[in-house]
Image (cartoon, rainbow, N blue to C red):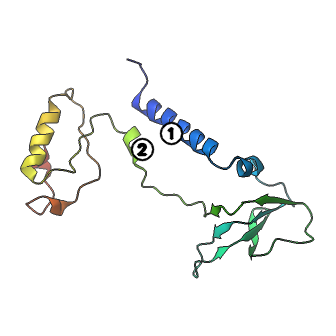
Amino acid sequence: MSDISRRGFFGTAAAAAVGAAAAQGAPDVAAQTPTAPPAVDETLALVNGRIHTMDGRNTVARVVTIRNGRFVSVGDTAPRNVPNVRTIDLGGRTVVPGLIEAHVHIVSLANRPGYHTILENTTSIREIQETLAARRRDVPDGQWITSMGGWIPNQWKEGRRPTRRELD
């Protein structure tokens, strides 16, 4: 067996997934996308897209113009008579704001010590205890058993979460 750590494995897997997704995406758009911020006094126009602005009206624009890192126009018409415009034709693709979504299980699992136990299918606290006891046989002394997500307290007949004492 390899000496690669769990964190190293998931890091490599995530990088490979991002690379594969990029390779399967739109190479024509990826090739036009700048890898560095626009130069000073440069204007970037994204045209022919479905650009979700996330404003109060849920506007979906076809064109946005960005100058020196700031949006200067949002609408349906490409900029005219603007010097130093770099235009990227989105070909009808969708653009969304750069949102950060902190609910990413693969990252959380990469930080786990490796003794994750699924409790989603348990129906009572007693069943949780039995599941954890069975898992404990394979876990070295001093190591944590973890379980994350996939369950809700009212799935158990007791209608509550187990106490720490019940879990220990």
Residue 126 left/right relative to 154: left
Residue type beneath disc 2 = Ile
Q: Which label belongs to residue 158?
A: none
Residue 47 sits in quarter: bottom right
Residue 158 left/right relative to 17: left
* Mark 1 surroundings within 10 Å by alpha-carbon count, few (fewer than 14), some (14 through 19), many (20 or more): some
Whole-percent x, y for residue 61 in the image: 68, 73
Residue 24 sits in quarter: top right
* Mark 2 surroundings within 10 Å by alpha-carbon count, few (fewer than 14), some (14 through 19), many (20 or more): few
Screen quadrant of the C terminus? top left
Work out which residue is located at the far top of the displayed protein and give it: 1
Residue type beneath disc 1 = Ala
- Residue contact at pointers 2 and 1, CB within 8 angstroms: yes
Whole-percent x, y for residue 128 in the image: 13, 47
Q: Name the secondary structure under disc 1.
A: helix
Residue in view at x 40 percent, y 38 percent? 110
Q: Which label belongs to residue 14?
A: 1
Whole-percent x, y for residue 57 in the image: 58, 82
Residue 53 position (above or below residue 126) = below
Residue at which label 2 appears = 106
Residue 21 position (above or below residue 37) = above
Residue in view at x 43 percent, y 23 percent? 4
Q: Name the secondary structure under disc 2.
A: helix
Residue 18 left/right relative to 167: right
The disc, 2 or 1, on the residue closer to the chain's N-terminal end is 1
Screen quadrant of the N terminus? top left
Give the spatial CA distance, label 2 vs label 1: 8 Å
Whole-percent x, y for residue 75 in the image: 73, 76
Pick the residue in front: 138 or 77.
Answer: 77
Residue in view at x 41 percent, y 19 percent? 3
Residue in view at x 76 percent, y 60 percent? 89
